[in-house]
Amino acid sequence: MNQPKGAIIALLVFLFFSSEGFTQETPDSEEEIPFYKNQIELHHDNDFLLFTDWYYTTGSFINYRLLLNELEEDRDRKQLLLGISQEYYTPSNITETNVRLFDRPYAGYSSIINALTFTNDRRILDFNFQMGVTGPISGAEGFQSWFHSSNESGNPEWIGQIENAVHMNLYATYTRDWQLIDDKFGVHFAWSPKVALGTKDIFLENGTNFYFGKRRNLRQTMAYHQIGKIQPEFFFVVKFAYRYVIYDGLLEGFFREDSSIFTVDPVEHFFTYGLEGFFRKKRMEYNIGYNYASPRAPETFLHGWITISIARNF
């Protein structure tokens, strides 16, 4: 089982020591609403609770967000994100040594993330630039092998993984959000088309989300990682996305002069769906979700994973 227990322990410690005032009441007056321009988030994806250890098996992210301007009604608010990530992708049989029997290649991906978000009352524009590496230099093979060697779980072979390469990718997302029911238990609907262009991914995506519960507007909600005036929220989202895949460097290798010994073509039509819950109290934010993805390659299967996120505003 590929679950970096240290990461989960770190999340729990962060939660314990960061939850001061968790039970305090939120001020009712507008003047007393706290305002924060910074946020640090720890985000982890893993399929360990589903008792699997394959495909997209682990993803770890550390994100820092900064509000670049005060909230003004007649202009966009700008928010910056700086982050680092590491993701692991493995075939379904991690003890197999014959690459001809793999359903997908091993792939590790580590990246530096820089994003800029523009938000107004009607829509969000998000531009996300990533520079990352695949192959042994990503550190995924070494870290996962170390983790498995420290317990009784099977050690992945990492034979035939996608070779070393440097990738650059740009992701652009447009989000339009509508409030369908304005009540203590409200309903929002969002439409989010997305495009990716670069050496790691090229795709077109169309996503829809339904939000149920106590959720703030576009400028204030944690649904879109908005910081500034922080007020309590408690809601969940049912989400669905369809992606038309043109190129996937974690399956096909680098698009030019790749030396990987085993690659596969991606499935062109890719779907993801899931259910996530969100809770914000004072300066703390919590998110847990259950996600599924359709097969990424012809021989793979439906795959699920759990998302856990804790953020602190300051």
Image (spheres, rainbow, N blue to C red):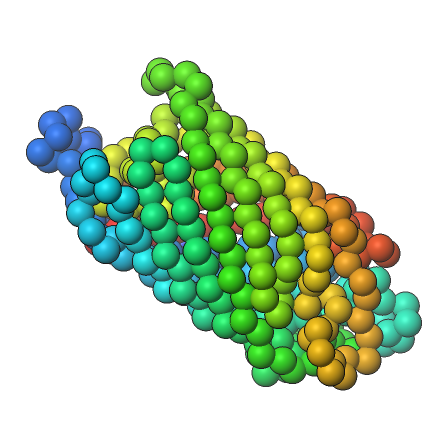
Residue at the image position 61 percent from the left and 46 percent from the top: 205
Q: Quadrant of residue 247?
A: bottom right
Q: Quadrant of residue 121?
A: top left
Q: Is residue 231 above or below residue 15?
A: above
Image location of residue 290, percent across then percent down = 59, 42
> Of all residues shown, which one is farthest toward the left?
31
Q: Is residue 35 above or below residue 81?
A: above
Q: Quadrant of residue 114?
A: bottom left
Question: Does residue 48 appear in this view?
Answer: no
Residue at the image position 59 percent from the left and 66 percent from the top: 198
* Quadrant location of the C terminus in the rendered image: bottom left
Instruction: Name the side, left or right, on which 19 lies relative to 57.
Output: left
Question: How many badges with numbers are in the image?
Answer: 0
Image location of residue 270, percent across then percent down = 72, 47
Instruction: Name the side, left or right, on which 157 lies relative to 191.
Output: right
Question: Does residue 124 appear in this view?
Answer: yes
Q: Is residue 100 above or below residue 77?
A: below
Image location of residue 122, percent across then percent down = 36, 33
Instruction: Name the side, left or right, on which 189 lies relative to 14.
Output: right
Image location of residue 312, percent across then percent down = 30, 52
Between residues 297 and 175, which one lies in front from this camera angle? 175
* Quadrant location of the N terminus in the rendered image: bottom right
Instruction: Name the side, left or right, on which 1 lies relative to 63.
Output: right
Residue at the image position 71 percent from the left and 78 percent from the top: 256
Residue at the image position 46 percent from the left and 40 percent from the top: 175
